[in-house]
Amino acid sequence: MLIIFLKLFLMQIVVGAVVVFILKKVLDHQLVELAIKTFKNAKLEPDDLKLGSILASSPGSVSKKIQDRVSQVAEKKFGRPMSIVIKKDKNLKGGLIIYLNSSIIDYSLVGRLKEGGIIRKI
């Protein structure tokens, strides 16, 4: 009986870990999509038009596809090709932050939790 209980307990732990991993990936994808959409709809200030490149922060590497999408949005908004500089910041835990001169588009997991008042601002 104890062996059956231990096997079931171990299986629940494994299934729980897989579910958490999948949910984290889905959440990260949604946050990145929201950051790109917000950037696409953002109103540029005169200071922003002086930018030579776009700085973005992410907790890990950003796929070429995402970099290309951000670059395409930036090119449409600025009317010229823009390079994208990705800075890794593991403290973000997920999502993407896009920095402009006049504003910051923060769709990182930590940023969303701070904005929602779930964690304190540090």
Image (spheres, rainbow, N blue to C red):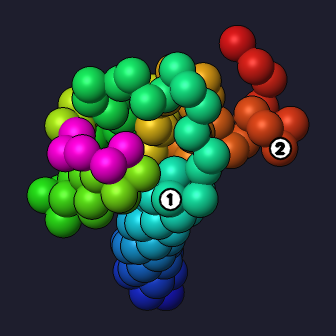
Give the main secondary structure, helix, strand or loop, of the magenta stretch: loop
State whether residue 83 is above or below residue 1.
Answer: above
In the shown orientation, is residue 98 left or right of residue 58? right
Instruction: Identify the amino acid type marked 2.
Output: Gly
Asked if residue 80 is among those painted magenta in the image, a careful observer would answer yes
For image coordinates 26% across by 25% down, the residue present is 52
Q: Residue furthest right?
A: 117
Is 29 in front, or is 70? 70
Residue matched to label 1: 40
Earlier-in-chain disc, 1 versus 2: 1
Q: Residue furthest left?
A: 64
For image coordinates 52% across by 20% down, the residue present is 47
Q: Position of residue 110 (x, y in %)?
A: 60, 37
Q: Position of residue 22 (x, y in %)?
A: 41, 73
Is 34 in front, or is 101? 101
Measured in 3D between alpha carbons, the distance from the residue under mark 1 to the one under mark 2, in whole angstroms, is 23 Å
Give the tally of numbered discs.
Answer: 2
At label 2, counting other C-alpha atoms closer than 10 Å, the crowd grade (few under 14, some 14-19, many 20 or more) is few
Disc 1 is placed on an element classified as: helix
Q: Which residues are magenta?
A: 78-82
Q: Which mark is residue 116?
A: 2
Q: Position of residue 4 (x, y in %)?
A: 43, 86
For image coordinates 76% across by 19% down, the residue present is 121
At label 1, counting other C-alpha atoms closer than 10 Å, the crowd grade (few under 14, some 14-19, many 20 or more) is some
Disc 2 is placed on an element classified as: loop
Q: Are marks 1 and 2 in contact (CB under 8 Å)?
A: no
- Can you tell which quarter of the image residue 111 is in? top right
State whether residue 25 is above or below residue 70.
Answer: below
